[in-house]
Image (tube, rainbow, N blue to C red):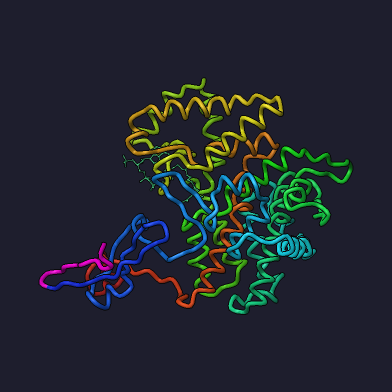
C-alpha cells in the first residue's frame, strides 16, 4: 500500500505522507498542507483527526480492544494493582519490585496537603459539587507546590508527578468530607493507595474504621479500568493546556473540568440518576428507549454509545462482572442493577441502537459498584478522575518528552461577516 496520499485541487496534484501505526492503522500527515496547498482541513469534533502519535494506549473501537502500553486491560485488571498500572502508563514499562516500591514510597511521602489548603475547602458552601472543589483545589497546588511548576525542568516535573499522584486522593476525600460536614481524615502512609483513600473517605475520628477488602479490590479494579483511554476529551484538554508549558497541576485541573461534562466522565453520575428516574417512573423502559430514539428529545441513554467503541466497551464487560460478584457477596440485591441489565437487553435488541452500534460504555455499570461501596453519586466522577489521573500525567509527560512539542493552536474556517464600515451608536 502506498506511503503517500494524492490530493488533487483544481489542476494541481499534491502528495501527502502516510504514517503507519503499530496495529495497521494509517494516518495522512497534513502538517505541511497549508504551506503546500493554501488549504486547511475541517473536522468538527475531531472525529477523523489524529492530534498526535502516542505510545501509551491502544483502543480498537471496532473490536472492543483496550491495551495500556501493549498490555491487555483484562490482564492488568486481573494481575496488577493501581499504582503498578500507573507506573506502567507514566513510564512505559511494568516496574520491577524495586521500582514499584520506590514509586509507592515516593507517592506516600507526599500525601499530606499544606495546612493552608484547608482554608480553601472551608470557603466552599456545603452543597458545592465535589468536582468543582476538586478542580479548584488541584489548581491551587500550583500555589502550594510552587517549587515544582516549571514543566520543562525534569526534576521539578518528576516531583510534581509524585505530588499529583499523592495528593489527588487526599483532595478527593477532603472534598467529600467537606460536603457532608465531617472532619477531614488524614492519610496514613502504612496503608495502600486504595486503602488510604477509602479510610480518608469513610473513617471518622470517633470510631475504628473496618475496611472491607472487597471494596478495596473493587476500587483498585475500577481505577485501573479508568486509568487511560487515548485522546479522549479530558486528556486532550490536559495536552492542550499543557502545551503552553503551564505546570502539571493547572493542566490536570483543566482535565478535571473537561471530565465533569455529562457527555464524558459525568455520564456515570448521570446514568445512575437516569436509572433512578426510570425506576421512580414505574420502570417503564419502553418510554425512555423511545425518548432516547426521538431526534426531537434531547434525552440520551447515559452510559450508552461511544465515539470510538462501535462494539462492547471491554471495561463495561469487566465492570458488569464485578457488579454480579460484589452484589452477590454483599447479599445486597440492587434493583437498579437489575433495571440496568434489563435496559441493556432492550436497547441491544432495538434497531436504533444496533444500527448506530451503541453499546454500554464504561459509565453504564460503574455507578452501581460505587453505590454498593457507599460512595455518593456526586462523587462518582471524582472517582473517574482519580482513576484517569495516571493517564493524564502520562500524556502530559509524553508530550513534554516529544522533540516536536509545540503549543497547540488549531486553525479555523471563518464564515462570519465580510469587512464592513463601523456604525456609530447614534446611527444604530
Ligand atoms: C466516556 O472518548 C473516550 O474515550 C471517553 C471515555 C474515556 O474513557 O475517556 O470512554 C469515557 O466519556 C464514555 C462516554 C460517556 N458518555 C455517555 O455515556 C453519554 C451518552 N453518550 C452519548 O452522548 C454519545 O454516545 C457520546 C457523547 C458518548 C458519543 O457521541 P458522538 O460520537 O458524537 O456520537 P453522536 O452523538 O454523533 O451519536 C451518533 C448517533 C446519533 O444519532 P443520529 O444523529 O445518527 O440519528 O447515535 C445517537 C445520536 O443521537 N446516540 C445516542 C446515544 N449516543 C449516540 N442516542 C441515544 N442515546 C445515546 N446514549
The image quadrant that residue 45 belongs to is bottom left
Measured from the top left, where is residue 145 in percent x and y? 70, 71
- Does the image show residue 199? yes
Q: 416 left or right of 54?
A: left
Residue closer to the observer: 75 or 427: 75
Total marks shown come to 0
Q: 129 left or right of 53?
A: right
Measured from the top left, where is residue 302 in percent x and y? 48, 38
Q: Is residue 7 magenta?
A: yes
The image quadrant that residue 349 belongs to is top left
The image quadrant that residue 330 belongs to is top right
Measured from the top left, where is residue 80 in percent x and y? 66, 50
Tell me the residue at 69%/61% (across/down). 96
- Is residue 307 depicted above or below 389 in this figure? above
Tell me the residue at 60%/24% (across/down). 335
Q: Is residue 399 magenta?
A: no
Q: Residue furthest left?
A: 11
Measured from the top left, where is residue 304 in percent x and y? 45, 38
Q: 302 left or right of 18?
A: right
Q: Which residues are magenta?
A: 1-11
Residue closer to the observer: 423 or 419: 419
- Does the image show residue 117? no
Q: Residue furthest top?
A: 282
Residue closer to the observer: 116 or 223: 223
Quadrant for ligand 1 reads top left
Tell me the residue at 42%/24% (across/down). 287
Quadrant location of the N terminus? bottom left
Amino acid at each position: 500500500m502506498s506511503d503517500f496520499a494524492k490530493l488533487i485541487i483544481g489542476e494541481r496534484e499534491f502528495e501527502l505522507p502516510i504514517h503507519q501505526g503499530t496495529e495497521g492503522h494509517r494516518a495522512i500527515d497534513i502538517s505541511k498542507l497549508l504551506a503546500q496547498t493554501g488549504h486547511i482541513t475541517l473536522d468538527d469534533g475531531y472525529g477523523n483527526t489524529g492530534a498526535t502519535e502516542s505510545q501509551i494506549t491502544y483502543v480498537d473501537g471496532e473490536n472492543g480492544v483496550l491495551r495500556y502500553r501493549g498490555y491487555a486491560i483484562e490482564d492488568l485488571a486481573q494481575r496488577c494493582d493501581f499504582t503498578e498500572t500507573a507506573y506502567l502508563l507514566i513510564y512505559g514499562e511494568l516496574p520491577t519490585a524495586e521500582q514499584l516500591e520506590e514509586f509507592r514510597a515516593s507517592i506516600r511521602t507526599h500525601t499530606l496537603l499544606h495546612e493552608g489548603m484547608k482554608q480553601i475547602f472551608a470557603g466552599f458552601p456545603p452543597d458545592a459539587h465535589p468536582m468543582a472543589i476538586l478542580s479548584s483545589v488541584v489548581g491551587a497546588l500550583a500555589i502550594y507546590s510552587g517549587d515544582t511548576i516549571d514543566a520543562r525542568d525534569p526534576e521539578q516535573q518528576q516531583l510534581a508527578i509524585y505530588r499529583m499522584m499523592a495528593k489527588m486522593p487526599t483532595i478527593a476525600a477532603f472534598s467529600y468530607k467537606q460536603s457532608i460536614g465531617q472532619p477531614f481524615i488524614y492519610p496514613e502512609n502504612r496503608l495502600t493507595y486504595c486503602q488510604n483513600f477509602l479510610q480518608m473517605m469513610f473513617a471518622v475520628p470517633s470510631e475504628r474504621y473496618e475496611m472491607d477488602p472487597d471494596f478495596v479490590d473493587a476500587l483498585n479494579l475500577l481505577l485501573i479500568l479508568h486509568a487511560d483511554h487515548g485522546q479522549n476529551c479530558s486528556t486532550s484538554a490536559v495536552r492542550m493546556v499543557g502545551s503552553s508549558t503551564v505546570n502539571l497541576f493547572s493542566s490536570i485541573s483543566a482535565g478535571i473540568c473537561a471530565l465533569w461534562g455529562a457527555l464524558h466522565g459525568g455520564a456515570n453520575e448521570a446514568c445512575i440518576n437516569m436509572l433512578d428516574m426510570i425506576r421512580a417512573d414505574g420502570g417503564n423502559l419502553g418510554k425512555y428507549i423511545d425518548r432516547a430514539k426521538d431526534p426531537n428529545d434531547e434525552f440520551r441513554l447515559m452510559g450508552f454509545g461511544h465515539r470510538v467503541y462501535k462494539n462492547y466497551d471491554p471495561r463495561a464487560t469487566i465492570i458488569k462482572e464485578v457488579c454480579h460478584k460484589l452484589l452477590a457477596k454483599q447479599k445486597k440485591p440492587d434493583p437498579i442493577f437489575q433495571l440496568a441489565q434489563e435496559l441493556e437487553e432492550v436497547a441491544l435488541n432495538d434497531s436504533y441502537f444496533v444500527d448506530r452500534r451503541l453499546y454500554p460504555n464504561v459509565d453504564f455499570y460503574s455507578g452501581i459498584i460505587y453505590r454498593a461501596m457507599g460512595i455518593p453519586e456526586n462523587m462518582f466522577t471524582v472517582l473517574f478522575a482519580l482513576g484517569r489521573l495516571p493517564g493524564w500525567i502520562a500524556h502530559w509527560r509524553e508530550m513534554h518528552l516529544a522533540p516536536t512539542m509545540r503549543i497547540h493552536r488549531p486553525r479555523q474556517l471563518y464564515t462570519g461577516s465580510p469587512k464592513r464600515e463601523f456604525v456609530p451608536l447614534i446611527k444604530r
